[in-house]
Image (tube, grey):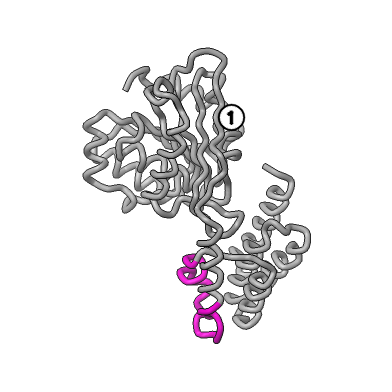
Amino acid sequence: MSDEQSRYRAVEEEAFASYGAGRYAEGAATAIAAIPRLPCYRADLAHLAACLLALAGRPDQAYAQLRAALAAGAWWHRRILVDDDDLAALRDIDGFDALVSTAHARCVAAGAQAPEPVLRRPDGPPVGLLVALHGAGEDADDAARAWAGAVPEGWLLLAVSSTQRNTPAYRSWPEHAVGVRDIEAALGLLDETERALPTVAAGFSAGGRQAIRWALGGGAAAFVAMAPAIAPDHLDPAATAAAAARGVTGRVLIGEADDDVRDEALAAVGKLRAAGLRCGLDEIPGLGHRFPADFSARLATILAGVPSKH
């Protein structure tokens, strides 16, 4: 994680704490104060401030934050301006529709380019291929660091970035079919021998959802998902039944204090199991929406149990 990314995460966490406590104006002030020192996150901070100001009953100020950021070159995907209920109060402001159109046009013009995948090879012949997908707001470098524990265990690690962006700095996996294309494009960089290795789909948060669904759809023989942002309605019954019949297996790890995704993820695990798919579940005491400190050791144990052949 870069220094600027780390500082942005700290600001975001502080603003979200204010959001959760209903101190919307205070959270907006936190985001606005950070704008001069976090230029790469201009769009993200303006969006965060606008959401909080709108909730504080200040829609005109919220709109002004977005307009100022747009004038400075920022952009957003249409979905986070139009579909975000926090910004509902802005929809009737004169000029908001034009702002959305301009911002989205810039998003499209920026292109669906992703950073190069990150490939990490073990010292000897690889025993398998781990395809690692980042969480929302991250990229392949973050995924490579998080899942690096697979490499000493003999696994070839391929970390993939999503091409789907809400802002210049925010990548995620909202559209599954686009995510599948991103993964397949990254796999195309491997040679035939590497592509034929036993494959495990891995991911954190939004990347965990993408990994699970990709594995169920035939992309991998197994999946490992850390705090997946998945709900039962993300699971196609036919694909899940077919995956169970093929012998696809999975493991979900989630913190007992993860208020972001815990309830829906547990319900999704229940649905997978009800369909006959073998899915292990590790609930980690005291952990929020993040990786545990001993994740590499946990991952090594999980990968040791993956069959050597599809």
Left or right of residue 298: residue 61 = right
Q: Residue furthest top?
A: 124
Q: Position of residue 279 (x, y in %)?
A: 34, 34
Left or right of residue 138: residue 2 = right
Q: Nearer the viewer, residue 306 or 4?
A: 4
Q: Nearer the viewer, residue 15 or 161?
A: 161
Left or right of residue 96: residue 10 = right
Disc 1 is placed on an element classified as: loop
Q: Is residue 89 magenta?
A: yes
Q: Nearer the viewer, residue 144 or 237?
A: 144
Where on the picture, by quarter, is residue 16? bottom right
Above/below status of 275 relative to 263 = above
Residue found 55% across the figure and 30% down from its top: 119
Residue found 33% across the figure and 19% down from its top: 309
Quarter occupied by the C terminus: top left
Residue topped by disc 1:
294
Q: Position of residue 232 (x, y in %)?
A: 33, 50
Q: Amino acid at mark 1?
A: Asp
Where on the picture, by quarter, is residue 36? bottom right
Q: Report the number of discs.
A: 1
Q: Which residues, given as a range, are shown in magenta?
A: 78-98
Left or right of residue 148: residue 229 = left
Q: Examine the rendering and report whether any part of residue 24 can be seen.
A: no
Residue found 22% across the figure and 37% down from its top: 242
Q: Is residue 3 magenta?
A: no
Q: Nearer the viewer, residue 208 or 189?
A: 189
Quarter occupied by the N terminus: top right
Q: Position of residue 49 (x, y in %)?
A: 64, 69
How many other residues sit within 10 Å of disc 1, few (<14), some (14-19) or many (≥20)? few
Q: Examine the rendering and report whether any part of residue 114 can be seen.
A: yes
Q: Majority secondary structure of the magenta segment?
A: helix
Q: Position of residue 66 (x, y in %)?
A: 62, 73
